[in-house]
Image (cartoon, rainbow, N blue to C red):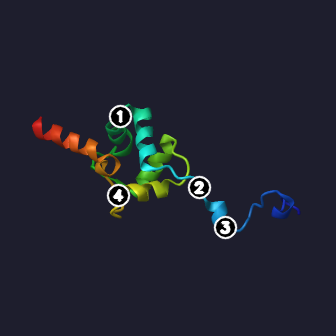
Amino acid sequence: EAGGASPASGGASPKAPWSPAANHLPVIGPEDFSKLLKQRFGSIYAGWTWHLDISEKGRVPRGEFVSRARAMGVNGNVGKLFQDLDREGKGYITLGDVAPAVELAVNDLHTFA
């Protein structure tokens, strides 16, 4: 076939039709994401404040999360990761969605400070 190999010949077609199998991306779970924050930034809280919630609004919308997670090196289905974190379907995540215990500790610190 001119212009590229056909799927029948074992090559990839530049205009191959969409299929669920071709669109499947590996999923990183919330626990793996927390581990990545710890590895990259030293703690979940540091990763949240330095990389995710850079506007300091206390929440990160889906689009911002996806781009920031990819910039951190998260591969695969980042949209699914967001859905797993945003269990209530708010359209944004908070520190409490990523690490409830960390959010409680931060709130306690602010209360007693």
Q: Is residue 97 left or right of residue 108?
A: right
Closer to the chain start, of discs 1 and 3, is 3
Q: Which residue is mark 3?
A: 19
- Measured in 3D between alpha carbons, the distance from the residue under mark 2 to the one under mark 1, in whole angstroms, is 27 Å
Task: Give the camera-side residue of 58 and 20.
Answer: 20
- Measured in 3D between alpha carbons, the distance from the residue under mark 4 to the one under mark 2, in whole angstroms, is 22 Å
User: Residue 37: image x %, image y %?
Assistant: 41, 38
Quarter of the image where the N terminus is located? bottom right
Closer to the chain start, of discs 2 and 3, is 3
Is mark 4 in CB contact (under 8 Å) with mark 2? Answer: no
Amino acid type of the residue tagged 1 in the rendering:
Ser
Amino acid type of the residue tagged 4 in the rendering:
Tyr
- Measured in 3D between alpha carbons, the distance from the residue under mark 4 to the one under mark 3, in whole angstroms, is 29 Å
- Measured in 3D between alpha carbons, the distance from the residue under mark 1 to the one under mark 3, in whole angstroms, is 39 Å
Is mark 1 in CB contact (under 8 Å) with mark 3? Answer: no
In the rendered image, the vertical position of residue 43 relative to residue 19, given as above or below: above
Residue ID at (67%, 61%): 22
> Within the image, what quadrant is residue 88 found in?
bottom left
Per the image, label 1 sits on a secondary structure element best described as loop
Per the image, label 2 sits on a secondary structure element best described as loop
Q: Mark on residue 92?
A: 4
Closer to the chain start, of discs 4 and 2, is 2
Question: Mark 4 or mark 3: which is in front?
Answer: 3
Q: Which residue is mark 1?
A: 43
Closer to the chain start, of discs 2 and 1, is 2
